[in-house]
Image (cartoon, helix red, strand yellow):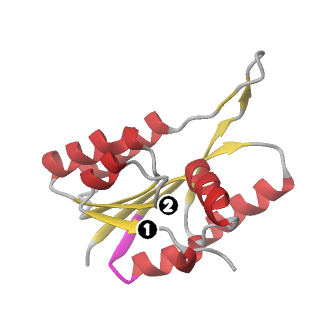
Amino acid sequence: MRKIAVFVDVQNIYYTTRDTYQRQFNYRLLWQELMAQGDIVVANAYAIQRSDDQQHKFQKALKHIGFNVKLKPYIQRSDGSAKGDWDVGITIDVMEAAAKEHIDTIVLLSGDGDFDLLLSHIKAEFNVNTQVYGVPNLTANSLINAADEYHKIEASLLLA
């Protein structure tokens, strides 16, 4: 059975599906699709912590599906801008999973081109299959090209 590790850039998926489709991503359907490919041994969803009932319900739903939800505090800067980036944390966890868990497939949900080097590195270093799920036109070409498989997030992977 293939060992699969899943890493979700929650903010990226939330905003790209909302802005493109005005709908939310269906994490349960994704889980079912991936379970058909093998055994999910690592599943992390990276989100920003806000004290909001909708966020708590969403995080609880992710945990119920099987995700380990990792939270980082939402930081509001004095100039009005905000910070809440998980790129380094995702990178470390992907590297550790590839090195220590003997993963066959790494699945990344993000359109962020900053992850292209990560995918290229783990493919070369650990000989893992890499898959990316991202919204068309909002997923960096460099990320698509770095992945072994690119899955377009379209209506079939969204909540009704």
Mark earlier in primary sequence (2, 1): 2
- Asked if labels 1 and 2 touch by Cβ distance under 8 angstroms, the answer is yes
Q: Secondary structure at mark 2?
A: loop
**Which residue is found at the position 72% from the left and 62% from the top?**
58
Packing grade of label 1 (10 A; few <14, some 14-19, many >=20) is some
Query: What quarter of the picture does the C terminus occupy?
Result: bottom right
Q: Where residue 43 is drawn, which disc sits there?
A: none
Front residue of 129/146: it is 146
Packing grade of label 2 (10 A; few <14, some 14-19, many >=20) is many
For disc 1, the marked residue is: 152
Front residue of 133/28: it is 133
Q: Is residue 10 above or below residue 58?
A: above
Identify the residue at the far bottom of this view. 36
**Which residue is found at the position 61% from the left and 48% from the top?**
11
Q: Quadrant of residue 3?
A: bottom left
Identify the residue at the far right of this view. 53
Q: Amino acid at mark 1?
A: Lys
Q: Where residue 135 is drawn, which disc sits there?
A: 2
- Please give the range of residues in magenta: 36-41
Q: Is residue 27 above or below residue 129?
A: below
Front residue of 118/72: it is 118
Front residue of 117/152: it is 152
Percent x, y for residue 52? Answer: 84, 49
Percent x, y for residue 131? Answer: 32, 62
98 relative to 65 in the view: left or right: left
**Which residue is found at the position 52% from the left and 38% from the top?**
86
28 relative to 146 in the view: left or right: right
